[in-house]
Image (cartoon, rainbow, N blue to C red):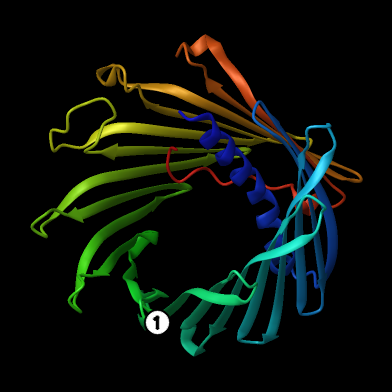
Amino acid sequence: MDMSRVLLLAIVIFSSLALWAQTSDSETGDGNKSWTATTNSQSDADSTRTTESHTQSGNRTVDSQSTQHRGPDGSFQPYQDIEKETVQVDATTVRTITRAFDRDANGGKTLVQVIEEERHTLPGGDSTVTSAISNPDANGNLQLVKRQIEETKKTSPNVEETKTTILLPNLNGGLAPAVKTQERREQGANGTVQSQKTTLLPDGAGNWQVGEVRQSTTALEGTNRSTQERVSLPDSEGKLGLVSSTVTQTASTPGEARNTVDTYSVDVAGAVPDGSLHLVGRATTVQSTSATGQQTTEQQVQQVNPGDPAAGLRVTTVTVDMVRPGASGAQATRTVQARDANGTYDSFGVISVDTKKSDNIHAIQVQIAPSDKPK
């Protein structure tokens, strides 16, 4: 496994702590809450420091994130800033603007991207979401590079349909539809949910062709949940064929939750395709909470060894998260270990350690959601 990809995965998942917290205040009904949090990440490749702040007042929420990289002289230098402003315009409309800035050698900020989103909730549970991404051109003027329109309608009490259109720049300098998706979700008996999502792509002649079909079934049995997703792609003749499947099993008992994700594919690293599905990855996540409130999450990722695909799965990464609440806030630690070049289980090396502190326990006292798929 490429170490940079593992490190990136660690940073992204660890950052989800703050992303979850940014919505938790509104969900708990606290209209005025602020907090700050600092994350230090250390690895063989890089060292970073990320400072986050969350301010909520009335119908306006501001989340800021500033990242610094350790420079050659050992000091931290500004690298990137992200500012997100969310406004509850009225009872049915939420508007969000996210701005990303890069930093130059002197610490100056340069705007590199703006994302605008507006969400409308309509009577009966219908909704529309429109978003736009703009990047600056050579002269610093913002240019629209992507627009997305998502419409969700409840066609019956148990059926919901979502149509999404993505528009991208065309040769005429404007935007034109480039991808369309159609998704149907149906709620069945005993918590069963079935869905099908079809992705359509233009064929260059003004027609839309199926590019992918995802079918998913979720079933509940007590506190246990199972989900199977099957992905089909068209071949050279346009005929759909099954290429992958993901089976997720979730079980919970008092104080512990276990999640297992098995991934099957017709493509196996190091093996000749035979047209059948084979188990190529497994991610097992166990979350537990102690009597003192400490939360521990351990995830093991297993993958096929390309050098010996017939040998089955082997552990490639182990990630451990610990969140410790305290009277003045909370502290979290994430440690990522990966198999070294020798490929032996006993020679796992630590590739990154992240620590995070916050003056508000709600900023990090959460259980990290398990990965949907092994990476």
Q: Residue furthest right?
A: 328
Q: Residue furthest front?
A: 139
| Residue 12, horizontal then vertical, whole percent | 60, 46
User: In what quadrant of the picture does the N terminus appear?
Assistant: top left
User: In what quadrant of the picture does the C terminus appear?
Assistant: top left
**Horizontally, is 44 left or right of 148 in the view?**
right
Residue identified by numbered label 1: 153
At label 1, counting other C-alpha atoms closer than 10 Å, the crowd grade (few under 14, some 14-19, many 20 or more) is: some
All told, the count of numbered labels is 1
Q: Residue at x 34, y 72 (%)?
A: 178
**Horizontally, is 287 left or right of 109 in the view?**
left
Q: Residue at x 45, y 75 (%)?
A: 148
Residue 279 position (above or below residue 153):
above
Q: Residue at x 51, y 88 (%)?
A: 122
The kind of secondary structure element at disc 1 is strand
| Residue 136, horizontal then vertical, whole percent | 60, 70
**Horizontally, is 69 left or right of 152 in the view?**
right
| Residue 307, horizontal then vertical, whole percent | 31, 18
**Amino acid type for the residue under numbered disc 1:** Lys
Relative to the observer, which residue lies in front, 299 or 82?
82
Q: Quadrant of residue 56?
A: bottom right
Q: Residue furthest left?
A: 237
| Residue 323, horizontal then vertical, whole percent | 74, 38
Q: Quadrant of residue 35?
A: bottom right
Residue 34 position (above or below residue 51):
below
